Amino acid sequence: THICTNMSEQFAEGDHVEYHPVGGAMQTSTGRIDRIITEREHVGAQIVKASDDIPRYVIVNDHTGKETAYKLENIIKKI
């Protein structure tokens, strides 16, 4: 299990979070962190370029059930 920090908050697999979807401007969504990836991986139809220094958080959206990989800066807080 990976744990990463956004300012003073830590996020781990299984955490329920509020986040900014890509292209969502000020809109927010909620979901669960399914996994944290640290290497190149397919997520849905996308190839995600992640690393130990720049991990990506695969979040399953509460409303759509869709999983998408996000950067740490997209995650606002645990809820």
Image (cartoon, rainbow, N blue to C red):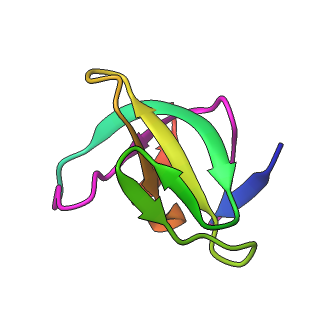
- Classify residue 67 by image quadrant: top left
Q: Is residue 78 left or right of residue 68?
A: right
Residue located at (45% from left, 62% from top): 47
Decide whether residue 14 is among the magenta residues. yes
Q: Is residue 6 visible?
A: yes
The answer to whether 64 is drawn above or below residue 58 in the figure is above
- Classify residue 51 by image quadrant: bottom right
Residue located at (34% from left, 31% from top): 66
The percent coordinates of residue 4 (x first, y second) are: 72, 58
Q: How many marks?
A: 0
Residue located at (49% from left, 64% from top): 48
Q: Is residue 75 left or right of residue 56?
A: left
The answer to whether 54 is drawn above or below residue 69 in the figure is below
The percent coordinates of residue 39 (x first, y second) are: 68, 66
Q: Hey, which residue is sitting farthest right in the picture?
A: 1
Using the image as rendered, state which of residue 13 and residue 51 is in the foreground: 51
Q: Hey, which residue is sitting farthest bottom in the picture?
A: 53
Q: Is residue 10 visible?
A: no
The answer to whether 15 is drawn above or below residue 28 in the figure is above
Using the image as rendered, state which of residue 53 and residue 44 is in the foreground: 44
Residue located at (49% from left, 37% from top): 17
Span highlighted in magenta in the image = 7-25
The answer to whether 57 is drawn above or below residue 15 in the figure is below
Decide whether residue 66 is among the magenta residues. no
**Location of the N terminus (image quadrant):** top right
Q: Is residue 44 left or right of residue 25?
A: right
The percent coordinates of residue 60 (x first, y second) are: 44, 31
